[in-house]
Image: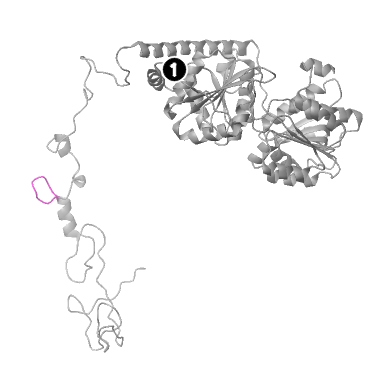
Amino acid sequence: MRALADQGYETPTPIQAQAIPLVKQGHDLLGIAQTGTGKTAAFALPTIDYLIREERDAPKRGGRVLVLAPTRELAQQIAASFRAYGKFMDLSVACIFGGASVRGQIKAVVGGNDVLVATPGRLIDLIQQKALRLSDVEVLILDEADQMMDMGFIHALKQIVPLLPKERQTLFFSATMPKKIKQLADQFLTAPKTVSVTPAATTAERVEQQIYRCQKAEKQALLVTLLQAYDFNRALVFSRTKHGADRIVKKLAAAGIPAGALHGNKSQGQRQRILAAFKGGDSRVLVATDIAARGIDIDGITHVINYDLPNVADQYVHRIGRTARAGRSGLAVSFCSPDEAAYLKDIQKLIKQTLPVMPLPEDFNKKVAAVARMKPAPSQGHSPRNDPRRKKQGVHQGGGEGSEGRNKKRRKGFKKKANAAQADIESAINSDSPTSSKKTPSKNARPKNAGRRAAPSRDDKHVRDVPEWKRKSTNPDGSRSQRKKRNEERRPKGEGTRPDAKKEGGKNKPFNRKPKKAGGKSRTDPSGGQKGSGRKGRDANAKPQNRGGEAPPKRRNSRK
């Protein structure tokens, strides 16, 4: 109870009020609830209560409770929740996931743990290395099962479940319940109790939803304009592709808006630093793919912006569920280009709502032109720890006065860029002449090719200085060059040369055609006469044909 009081929990949520009593009774559970409704506490609290009541030693190279999560961030979040709920008791929790050192995770697993939180891929790797076994698992928990299906973890789950003991308690939680999830639950659960708090694929009540219709090339200008106009605490921007997220971050940095990109191409260390900067307030904008749409619990997100509409309608519900959490209100804004009209139709059909279409801001075309002229900021890499420049600046790894000074300088720099970008946009709007990216040349402007040497002609001196072997086969006066004459002198004249031999250079091979054999028949001459140049059909008394009228010379031995 002290741990729950420290977390600020006073009254249970609907999913917690219905699921916790059933789990404490030992039933298998199938829970269906929206994201952000407190599902983690719904299975973590009764599980910790079971571990306290059934006190045993943690098994070596294993765990008593196994929790499977689809992403690294969600696995870390679940492990942190278990540690927070059990901080006043002797509870050992290990978290294993891909993208991190295998040796460190093996050391954490070998000694045994009460709770083991893992992603399916890394769990199978450790099992194959014989660093982990699942024969002592007493409780199996699957969180965000529908996302596991979407990410292709169904085959991994089918490899993991046979390794578990048959007598166990299984808890199955999902935000949606398609047919495949229902079939999977029937395979893993035994006489389960079903808890459904809200209908599947329904949005949160406190989320205000809006739609802006614009062209695809105008989305960046619309994003910059809205972020400059909104009074937001933290904004989460969703992009459909990884490279698209990186482009959005660079454009925002050019407009003076600090942001970070979170997607699968980032290493685990980069993802943790980006999330820490977003949670700490160093950057108030996070641009992410759907990797952050499920299970990532970040407090204080007031705005969710769908830069690209999801091609799967269910993802829309999970995206906007990142805001309006814990009874708060939020705003979800979506940009819809003409090629995404079908996605919007599917979303409105799924949530059974017609989203209001908002008008574009004033002077939007001029703002689009002003944002298009901004050059994307270069990507900033992480300098090494032993860089002497970092030592001179007093920047230390892991925080301290140096890191605080660096963050202040970054915020000042972004503020200057934001003011300059806003001034450029206002000047473009207030200017009477239409905006154009082309510059009008001044009267005293220097000609483009001024000071450059003109292209040489054939009569110039430096052309006559070209070496003789580089000249063409004919001189300007029409006579043959010395190179042409020299090649003619080298070529042997006479009979018996190939007609297709090269005229200039190269070796001339002798004309050496074998006489055709007699006795063959032709299609036109049944007596054996020759129709063409084939070997069959030649007259036996016919003389061998040769252009010179003589017998062909003997074949030269190519080896000699």
Q: Quadrant of residue 200?
A: top right
Residue 266 visible in the shown view = no
Residue 222: x %, y % from top left: 46, 21
Neighbor class of circle 1 (other Cα within 10 Å; few <14, some 14-19, many 20+) is: few
Q: How many marks?
A: 1
Residue 460: x %, y % from top left: 13, 35
Task: Please provide the residue range marked out in magenta.
Answer: 474-481
Q: Quadrant of residue 446?
A: top left
457 sits left or right of 10 in the view: left
Frontmost residue, 352 versus 220: 352
Q: Which residue sits at x=37%, y=13%?
A: 429
Residue 229: x %, y % from top left: 50, 13
Label 1 sits on a secondary structure element that is: loop
Frontmost residue, 528 versus 303: 303
331 vs 63: above or below = above
Residue 252 visible in the shown view = yes
| Quadrant where the C terminus is found in the figure | bottom left
Magenta-colored stretch includes residue 294: no
The residue pinned by badge 1 equals 361
219 sits left or right of 484 in the view: right
Residue 31: x %, y % from top left: 75, 34
342 sits left or right of 437 in the view: right
| Type of secondary structure dominating the magenta stretch | loop
Q: Which residue sits at x=59%, y=34%?
A: 350
Q: How is the image coloured?
A: one colour
Kindly identify the amino acid type of the residue bearing the numbered disc 1: Pro
